[in-house]
Amino acid sequence: MIDLYTVPTANGQRASIMLEELALPYTVHVIDFKTKQHLSREFLAINPCGMAPAIVDREGPGGKPYAVFETMAIAFYLAEKTGKLMPKDLGARAEVYKWSAMVIADLASAFAGQFYFKIAAPEKNPYAIDLMEGRAKRFLAVLDQRLAASPFIAGQDYTVADVLTYPSATSSASRLDEGIKAFPNLQRWVDKVGLRPAVQRGMKVPA
C-alpha cells in the first residue's frame, strides 16, 4: 500500500495518474496549504521541502516504509518498482529521462510562474505574466514538434514521460487564453492519452 499526499494541481495529478497506470493500491491524503499542513512536523518528515505530492511506500526497499518526494522522482521510483512505463534499453530510457526533465524543469516551472503571477499574486504584473506565458508556449511548441514525428513523448511507446506531460498540457494549459489550439500535434496526443481509463481516474484525484 502507498500513501499519497497530494493537492488538486497538475503536480498532484502526475502522481495519481502514475499510481493508476501501475494499478498500485494507494490511500489519498489531501494536504491543506491554507492551514499550513504542509509545514507540520509530520509532513516535513516525509518531504522536508514541505511540498506536495509526496508518497510513502509502506513496502519500500528492504520491506520498510520509504518516502519519496518531487514529482519526477515519484514517477521514476514507481516505474522502477514495478518495471513498467520505463524502457529497458539505455537509449530509450535516456529519451524518457530528458523529455521528463524538460517537462518538469522547463514547461511545468513556466506554468507555475504563470499561475503565481496571473492567478495568485495580489497585484498583477503584465511583464511577468507575458514572460511566463511566453516560456510555456515556447515549450509547448517544442512538444508539438516532437509529437509531429513521434506517437508519444519519448518515442514509440507510452511511458513515464507521457504521464508527466499530460497534466501540463491539460490542467495547466487551460489557463492560456487559447489553450493548446495552436499545437495540433499536441492536441492529437492529448485526445489519445485522455482516453486511457487510468489517466481519467488519476485526473480526478483528489475527488
Image (cartoon, rainbow, N blue to C red):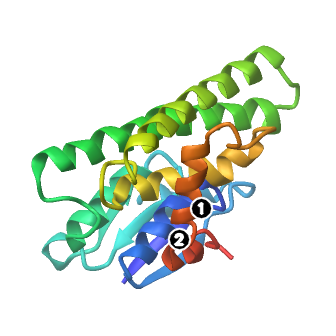
Residue 5: image tag? none
Quarter of the picture holding the N terminus = bottom left
x, y percent for residue 37: 63, 59
Q: Report the Cα–Cα distance between label 2 and label 1.
A: 11 Å
Of all residues, the one furthest to the right in this rendering is: 123
- The correct choice, above or below, for 127 with respect to 192 in the image is above
Nearer to the camera, 103 or 55: 103
Q: Secondary structure at mark 2?
A: helix
Other-residue count near label 2 (Cα within 10 Å), few / some / many at <14 / 14–19 / ≥20: many
What residue lies at 26% left-to-right and 43% top-to-bottom? Answer: 95
Asked if residue 116 lies left or right of residue 82, the reply is: right
Report x, y in % for residue 170.
64, 53
Whole-percent x, y for residue 202 in the image? 55, 72
Q: Quadrant of residue 140?
A: top right
Q: Residue at x 39, y 48 (%)?
A: 153
Residue that appears at 22% across and 75% down: 64
Tell me which residue sits at (60%, 24%) in the image. 135
Q: Is residue 174 visible?
A: yes
Residue kind at label 2, given as amino acid type: Val
Left or right, residue 57 beside residue 177: left
Q: Nearer the viewer, residue 203 or 5?
A: 203
Give percent across and percent down for residue 85. Answer: 29, 65
Residue at the spot of label 1: 191
Q: Secondary structure at mark 1?
A: helix
Task: Find disc 2 in the rendering and name its residue.
Answer: 199
Nearer the observer, 59 or 74: 74
